[in-house]
């Protein structure tokens, strides 16, 4: 299930990844795969920003601002009466809060 496009705060630091596969094991939405002995993001838009990958990566290869992307976008859309948007700056960027 995809949430909102281009709002996920998920980041992968490939230089820190050892390819242990823990993120693949804990991700409830199958965002990751092991490719060439390293983690790869299959589709960032599948990420629901639960934070399980970051909490379970003992090498610091993953970063996600758990719980903000989709929730913030939906709340901002509700408050403004518009489409869900994760932009808190009032500009046209899609950076999350």
Image (cartoon, rainbow, N blue to C red):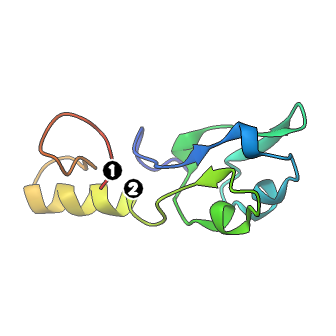
In this view, the residue in front, 48 or 95, is 95
Image-quadrant location for residue 40: top right
Residue 55 is situated, as x and y percent measured from the top left of the image, at: 66, 69
The secondary element bearing badge 2 is classed as helix
Residue 41 is situated, as x and y percent measured from the top left of the image, at: 67, 39
Residue beneath the point at 67% across and 61% down: 53
For the C terminus, the quadrant is bottom left
Nearer the observer, disc 2 or disc 1?
1
Residue 54 is situated, as x and y percent measured from the top left of the image, at: 64, 62
- Mark 1 residue crowding within 10 angstroms, few (<14) / some (14–19) / many (20+): some
On the image, numbered disc 1 is attached to which residue?
96
Residue beneath the point at 39% across and 45% down: 7
Disc on the earlier residue, 2 or 1: 2
> What label sits on residue 69 in the rendered view?
2
- Can residue 40 be seen in this snapshot? no
Image-quadrant location for residue 63: bottom right
Callout 2–callout 1 Cβ contact below 8 Å: yes
The residue most toward the top is 36
Position of residue 85 in the picture relative to residue 62 (left or right) = left
Q: Is residue 53 above or below residue 83?
A: below
Residue 5 is situated, as x and y percent measured from the top left of the image, at: 42, 39
Residue beneath the point at 67% across and 47% down: 31
In this view, the residue in front, 53 or 25, is 53
- Mark 2 residue crowding within 10 angstroms, few (<14) / some (14–19) / many (20+): many
Q: Is residue 7 above or below residue 79?
A: above
- Can residue 91 be seen in this snapshot? yes
């Amino acid at each position: 299930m995809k949430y909102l496009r281009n709002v996920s705060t998920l980041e992968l630091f490939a230089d820190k990844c050892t390819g242990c596969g823990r993120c693949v094991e804990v991700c409830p939405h199958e965002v990751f795969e092991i490719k060439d002995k390293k983690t790869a993001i299959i589709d960032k838009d599948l990420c629901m920003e639960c934070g399980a990958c970051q909490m379970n990566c003992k090498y610091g290869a993953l970063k996600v601002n758990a719980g903000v992307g989709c929730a913030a976008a939906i709340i901002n859309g509700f408050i403004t009466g518009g489409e869900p948007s994760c932009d808190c700056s009032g500009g046209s960027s899609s950076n999350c809060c």
